[in-house]
Image (cartoon, rainbow, N blue to C red):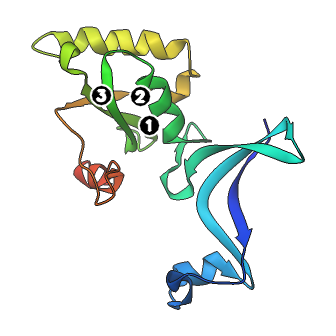
Amino acid sequence: MGSARRRCSTSTSRTASGTCGSAASASSFRAEWCTTADIFRRDAEGYYYYYYYYYYEGRADDLLKVSGIWVSPLEIENALLEHPALGEVCIVGKEDEGGLVKPLAFVVANDDAVPGAGLEADLKADLKAFLKERLTPYKYPRWFEWREHLPKNDQGKVARKVLKAEIGD
């Protein structure tokens, strides 16, 4: 796989947000080019009729720097969602007692796997063992927070900013 990069595109038209004059707009638009906060990785071997295959890695403003390495929360979320006991997951960064950022998992269990008294520790241990087969150790969530549901924004997506605010980020 190639290195992860921000998406750039060109167009003869601009969106309304690109003409507002804000600092974010100024850094996103350069001449006819627009650089988004979306991060993609290109498969160097994946040619298909002169196109590369691209893999979405998340947004630049959501990346976590864990053990000095940039980590996409989406990668951890996708690995956790492969577990049959989980319905929804959201990963955010949380500082440990030493001030270093580590992954925190907000987890919604499936109806048939709802953690109860004493079962959370068993499911947490099971999830850690499950992740050992899929992720490198620095990407493992250090904490799991169990929820009945995750907050959603007006588009129906998990409201990561709300969860970050809950932990004081």
Q: Identify the residue position indicated by label 1 in the image.
A: 102
Q: Where does the image place residue 109, in percent across and percent down from the top left?
A: 25, 23
Q: Where does the image place residue 162, in percent across and percent down from the top left?
A: 27, 54
At x 28%, y 12%, the residue is 123
Separation (CA) of disc 2 from disc 3: 7 Å
Camera-nearest label, 1 or 2: 2
Q: Is 48 on the left or on the right of 160, as rendered?
A: right
Q: Is residue 155 above or below residue 16?
A: above
Residue type beneath disc 2: Pro
Whichever of callouts 3 and 1 sits on the residue coming sooner in the sequence is 1
Q: Identify the residue position indicated by label 3 in the image.
A: 144
**Viewer-proximal residue among 102 and 62:** 62
Q: Is 82 on the left or on the right of 5, as rendered?
A: left
Separation (CA) of disc 3 from disc 1: 12 Å
Mark 2 secondary-structure assignment? loop
> Tag 1: Cα neighbours inside 10 Å, few (<14), some, or many (≥20)?
many
Residue type beneath disc 3: Phe
User: Residue 141: which numbered mark, if any?
Assistant: 2
At x 29%, y 57%, the residue is 153
Whichever of callouts 1 and 2 sits on the residue coming sooner in the sequence is 1
At x 55%, y 12%, the residue is 133
At x 55%, y 42%, the residue is 72
Contact? badges 2 and 3 (CB < 8 Å): yes
Mark 1 secondary-structure assignment? strand
> Tag 2: Cα neighbours inside 10 Å, few (<14), some, or many (≥20)?
many
Q: Where does the image place residue 58, in percent across and percent down from the top left?
A: 55, 48
Contact? badges 1 and 2 (CB < 8 Å): yes
* Residue furthest out toward the right: 50
Q: Is residue 168 above or below residue 86?
A: below
Separation (CA) of disc 1 from disc 2: 7 Å
Mark 3 secondary-structure assignment? strand
Camera-nearest label, 3 or 1: 3
